[in-house]
Image (spheres, grey):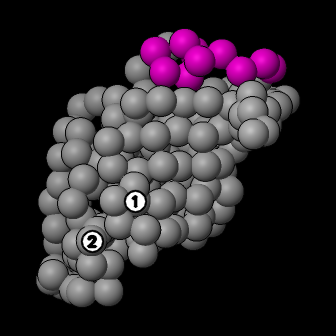
Amino acid sequence: MAAPDTNRFANIDLLTSAYRAVGKVMVTHTGVIGLLNDATKSYIEIHDARLAYIHMPTKLVGHFEVLRLLKSQIFVVCAARREELGPLSLLRGGFLSFKEHPVFLTTQVYEVRGTLELPGKFDYSAVMFEGTRDFVPIYNALISAILFPTLRMESPAGLFNRKRVDFMGLEADRRKE
């Protein structure tokens, strides 16, 4: 007997340095995090994709049946629901208990505020360098384009590309001026 088909579509909203794409990606039981952190494939396919410039977010560049993109070009991926990202065991690295760490991070194009869920205290080197995954989950994310303030996105769950991060700080360490 053949195994049941485990593929399904997940809705995503992603940002590159110049474009915003909204569409659906085909995922397995590992969700969006499994798709983006799959080391055997360097690109993704976005189905029913709408593409816009980040500096003119309401201007549609095109609507494509399938749009292909190198994963390395992605800064942030947002999902409408936490469940779209994948199973908790993948998102939390297998840990059952976690601690929430509100963070602020920057890339060359975006500022991202949100919460990292980590097992214990915040460890920058573990988040940024340990393991093989390039895309790290962030929750209750607020993303804004640095040069284009009209582009602001909120998402209950997302993934940021750790290879694109310039700075990261804990909100608890922010000084009140």
Task: Note whether 57 is above or below 152 in the view shown.
Answer: below
Q: Residue at x 69, y 44 (%)?
A: 115
Image marks 2 and 1: residues in contact by CB distance under 8 Å: yes
User: Where does the image place residue 176, in percent across and percent down from the top left?
Assistant: 78, 39
| Residue 55: mark in rendering | 2
Q: Mark 1, residues whose alpha carbon is within 10 Å: few (<14), some, or many (≥20)?
A: many
> Which corner quadrant holds the N terminus?
bottom left
- Could you tell me how far apart the alpha carbons at marks 2 and 1 are, in whole angstroms? 9 Å
Quick one: quadrant of the C terminus? Answer: top right
* Residue at x 56%, y 22% (from the top left corner): 127
What's the amino acid at mark 2? Answer: His
- Please, what is the three-letter code of the amino acid marked with disc 1? Ala
Q: Is residue 106 above or below residue 13?
A: above
Q: Is residue 162 left or right of residue 156?
A: left
Tell me: 47 left or right of 62.
right
List x then y, in percent, for residue 38.
Answer: 34, 36
The image quadrant that residue 27 belongs to is bottom left
**Is 150 placed left or right of 177 in the picture?**
left
Residue stretch rendered in magenta on the structure? 120-129
N-term mark: 2 or 1: 2
Marking on residue 145:
1
Residue at (42% x, 75% y) in the render:
150
Q: Is residue 27 visible?
A: no
Task: Report how many numbered discs are placed on residues in the image.
Answer: 2
SS category of the residue bearing label 1: strand
Q: Nearer the viewer, residue 98 or 9?
A: 98
Point 27% across, 71% down: residue: 55
